[in-house]
Amino acid sequence: MKRATLIRTLWHWHRRLGLVACVILLLLSITGILLNHSSQLGWDRSPISTQWILRSYGFQAPSEYHGIKLDRSYWVISDNQLFLDESPIASCNTPLHSLVAMSDLVAAACREQVMLFTMEGDLLESISVLPEPNLQSMAKLAGSDVLLLQYPGQHYSLDPNSLEVNPVAEVAVEFTSLVPVPQPITEALQQQFRVHDLTWERFFLDVHAGRWFGGWGWVLMDLGALFLLLLAISGVVMYTLRRTR
């Protein structure tokens, strides 16, 4: 093949490979910069609430939320979070499972924590030192504002005023039933749905590595690396051929 023909052929493919590689290079460059500054910008600890990204990972907001109605407000539990109407007011490391309404307080519980709130949603006390691990459920003693902590094989009373905890035998209890919340609140909470382990840093890293694009993501990134390699080789060859004319 003549030198001029070879240069034209190389230039023809060099331009086309460059257009394809440019898209992948831009993607790698942008996500690389974002990852490099994720800790300063807080993306390593910011859960994603963008619903189409969550759906791409297979996460879907609940179709229905449950809580209790006190006065004109709804107290809603959704996985690890507690909401007062549409506003998040607290979270737990494990999923919340109980809400109890008392005379002038509201108590929420997960497996390792009990939280006490005013009726306005202000946190008064967070009790993480419990008599046993793995709290199963919480109710209150019938006719009183004393909480009942239920564990497998053992129950404890918790006085919300003195915070005293004492083992108790079988007693009459009052459970607070959770009810579906109105549709406007449900829709507002769906827009706030997030998975705490799925941060923006994780998303940028998955896009950067090609994992977010599914099973063919690694092929896409390998092709991008191959195209960049071919661009470098064809560029050097064309430069050398032109210099040796």
Image (tube, rainbow, N blue to C red):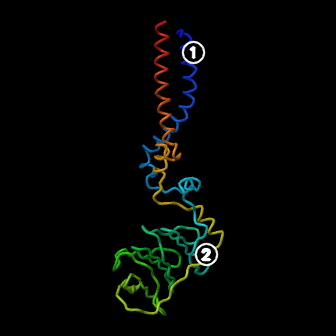
* Crowding at mark 2 (Cα within 10 Å: few <14, some 14-19, many 20+): some
Would you identify the image quadrant in which residue 110 lies? bottom left
* Residue drawn at the location 56% of the way across and 76% of the way down: 67
* Kind of residue at disc 1: Arg
Callout 2 secondary element: strand
User: Vertically, is 183 above or below 150?
Assistant: above
Residue contact at pointers 1 and 2, CB within 8 angstroms: no
Q: Residue at x 54, y 59 (%)?
A: 59
Vertically, is 148 above or below 134? Answer: below
List the single residue furthest toward the top. 245
Residue that mark 1 sits on:
8
In this view, the mark in front (1 or 2): 1
The residues tagged by marks 1 and 2 sit, at their Cα atoms, a distance apart of 70 Å
Residue at 63% in and 65% down: 187
Work out whether residue 182 or residue 86 is closer to the camera in this orientation and state it: 182
| Mark 2, residue position | 180
